[in-house]
Amino acid sequence: MKTVDVGKEFFAQLTNRDCRQREGKHTAIEFRAKYLSELDSEEAWKGDDVFIELDFQNVIRMGPSWANEVFAYFTQYARPERILKKIRLINISRVKRSIIEQEIETGHTRN
């Protein structure tokens, strides 16, 4: 299992779903492709092992559309509780965790 310091290794302000939002940099799609692409298949979700640990200690801000595109995207393969077992969230505020959980519960919204 690898640990990613999201704020340092990617970006501290997580608000852009895709390249059409705001300045179009540091997008959720880019994050998912860089760190979670191995989970983009039904086969990847069969085991219960933790795939990655995401450390949010250095994340200043996270928007719902970013969380939806990163996490709720995987509801096509797994139930919400399984997603949060495969992708472990550490050093995350209650607000950011709540945003992620809410987005996973409501499912992926495609533009």
Image (cartoon, rainbow, N blue to C red):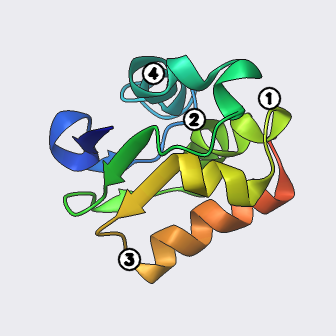
In this rendering, which labeled residue sits more in front, label 4 or label 1? 4
Distance, label 2 to label 1, CA atoms, is 9 Å
Say what amino acid the circle numbered 4 marks: Glu
Which residue is found at the position 51% from the left and 33% from the top?
28
Asked if residue 34 is positioned above or below residue 59 in the image, the reply reads: above
Residue 54 visible at all? yes
Quadrant where the C terminus sits is top right
Q: Earlier in the sequence, mark 2 or mark 1?
A: 2
Circle 2 SS class: loop
Q: Are marks 4 and 1 in contact (CB under 8 Å)?
A: no
- Residue pointed to by mark 1: 111
- Residue 30: image tag: 4
Looking at the image, which is closer to me, 90 or 21? 90
Q: Earlier in the sequence, mark 1 or mark 3?
A: 3
Distance, label 2 to label 3, CA atoms, is 20 Å
Say what amino acid the circle numbered 1 marks: Asn
- Residue 93: image tag: 3
Q: Earlier in the sequence, mark 2 or mark 4?
A: 2
Q: Earlier in the sequence, mark 4 or mark 1?
A: 4
Q: Earlier in the sequence, mark 2 or mark 3?
A: 2
Which residue is found at the position 75% from the left and 56% from the top?
80
Left or right, residue 37 beside residue 57: right
Say what amino acid the circle numbered 3 marks: Ser
Q: Quadrant of residue 70?
A: top right
- Residue pointed to by mark 2: 17
Residue 40, percent across and down?
A: 65, 20
Looking at the image, which is closer to me, 34 or 46? 46
Residue 22, percent across and down?
A: 48, 34
In this rendering, which labeled residue sits more in front, label 2 or label 3? 3
Q: Are marks 1 and 3 in contact (CB under 8 Å)?
A: no
Circle 1 SS class: loop
Distance, label 3 to label 4, CA atoms, is 23 Å
